[in-house]
Amino acid sequence: MKTQNRLTQNWDYILSLDSDRWLFHADVLVDKAHVVMLEERDIISREQSRDILNGLIAIEQRGAAEFIEQELLAHVYDDVHTAIESVLIRELGEGTGGRMHTGRSRNDEVATCIRIALRDDLIEVMKDVNELRSAVIAKAAEHVDTVMPGYTHLQHAQPTTLAHHLSAYSDAFARDFTRLVAVYERTNVSPLGAAAFASTGFPLDRASTAKLLGFDSVMPNSMDAVSTRDFVIEAIACFANLMTNLSRLAEEIILWSTAEFDFVRVPEYYITGSSIMPQKRNPDFAELVRSRTGTVYGCLMSALAICKALPYAYNRDLQEVTTHLLKATETTAASVSVMNRIVAGLEPKEEEMKKKTMVGFTTATELADTIVRATGISFRTAHKIVSSLAPVLTHKEIHELESGGDILRRIDALAVDVTGKKLSELGLTGENVKDAMDVCSNIEKRNVYGGPAKEQVRKTIETRTRDLNRDEKLIEAKEEGVKRSLEELERRIAELR
Ligand code: ARG
């Protein structure tokens, strides 16, 4: 299988060793299933299948790292697929080893391997996402009463609770989960038997190899089967979306751990010190989650750019897509796991959060709403009155303010300018004003579906916990299905050996 250009110094330019290491186990699996099927269809003899399967098992036992180092690199093979076949031929002779690739091409082989490796990694990422959801929900459940300022434009906006804020992330991660499930379903379809692209004249049983490998179905068009990497793009896009959600949480944790916010203490194992400043507790792990989001976007752009305008069917360009998939997958899996632990160990500072909720006139919306309900004037007019009051109140802590009655007098003065009438004459009382300025009562009033009131958040936490249990079972079922298929494959191999 050696050609002239293998002797040039540039041979390693065509290699993708990290991808090949990643695909090694999937490749052996694909070879085994293909051989079992070839024997089943009488395309190869029982003895030939036995020898090839034994040879494959010996290769498998050497492990990816050793095999690639000692075979692929030492003999300058094209890739892991060629290396495995070449070693088999060396060990068994071409009369037997040379039959494994009957009715197959590396094109359908590699596409099948990528789908298997990705399927397994998707399961791991989905489990990690579920652990993260669980950590976020658990932290939220501890902080249903932890009041904090909610922000828009990073300016104090309205009071909320840490539970409500964290539940928002748990919903985002739940959507990430459902996206991953959809990608899994489109990934777990078998291209095997498509051969180079036009299938083969051998009477292969594509359904049989698909079943033995734990695929849910067979790709119906043999050209599509080898040409497409849309499932890869979709997977990386999912990872990019997930990383975006992670990066926002990472960014908030970074901000919240500054002296300016002082909302949280980041767990000890997820901070670093400074080589010069003895006092530093730097949130480097969260910062790297933030930055690696960019890395994953880069993988997505690369995959899209490589696939764009590629003529059908297979082109070697497709090998390069796998590299970016692997990088995106590994980066995302590691980032989810880091964020899971950061969230689990996060120590919120309830007093500080509450204190900061008292500044920035976070109750202004509720004051306007209260005015509407007490007096019947329009929300827009109430908004005008309260916004004239804002410059006085924004930089004070709410508990430093005058009594409800004093604020009512200020409101009346402003209201006369805006509407020509005092709001106290329209039914607004000092008691109404006092209540509107209370942050806890603000939160409790926001008791509509999805709002921060305790009743709503408790319900949310209950439902999300149920959703999570359901989703964990879904993953178990998928894993179990694949496991049963691979056990059947092993049983068939045992029969033939
Ligand atoms: N290593 C190659 C890849 O990842 C395998 C397929 C090579 N096929 C070919 N016809 N050159 O795409």
Image (cartoon, rainbow, N blue to C red):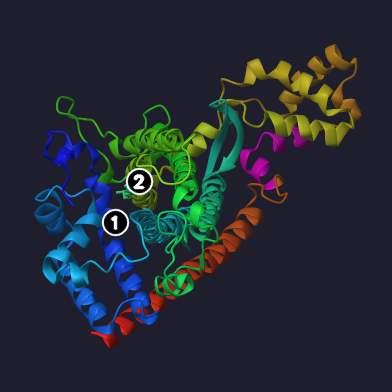
Q: Residue at x 53, y 26 (%)?
A: 154
For this view, does 152 lie left or right of residue 262? Answer: right
Q: Residue at x 73, y 31 (%)?
A: 367
- Ligand 1 contact, mark 1 (Cβ < 8 Å): yes
In this view, the residue in front, 471 or 281, is: 471
Task: State the CA–CA distance, disc 1 to disc 2.
Answer: 10 Å
Whether the magenta-drawn stretch holds residue 1 is answered as no
Q: Which residue is drawn at 27% across and 66% down?
A: 28
Residue 414 is situated, as x and y percent measured from the top left of the image, at: 79, 15
Report which quarter residue 261 is drawn in: top left
Residue assigned mark 1: 23
For this view, does 9 lie left or right of residue 372? Answer: left
Q: Residues within 10 Å of mark 2 (few under 14, many from 20)?
A: many
Residue 342 is situated, as x and y percent measured from the top left of the image, at: 35, 47
Indicate whether 101 appears above or below 491: above
Residue 427 is situated, as x and y percent measured from the top left of the image, at: 88, 32
Using the image, tell me which numbered label, if any, was put on residue 322: 2
- Ligand 1 contact, mark 2 (Cβ < 8 Å): yes
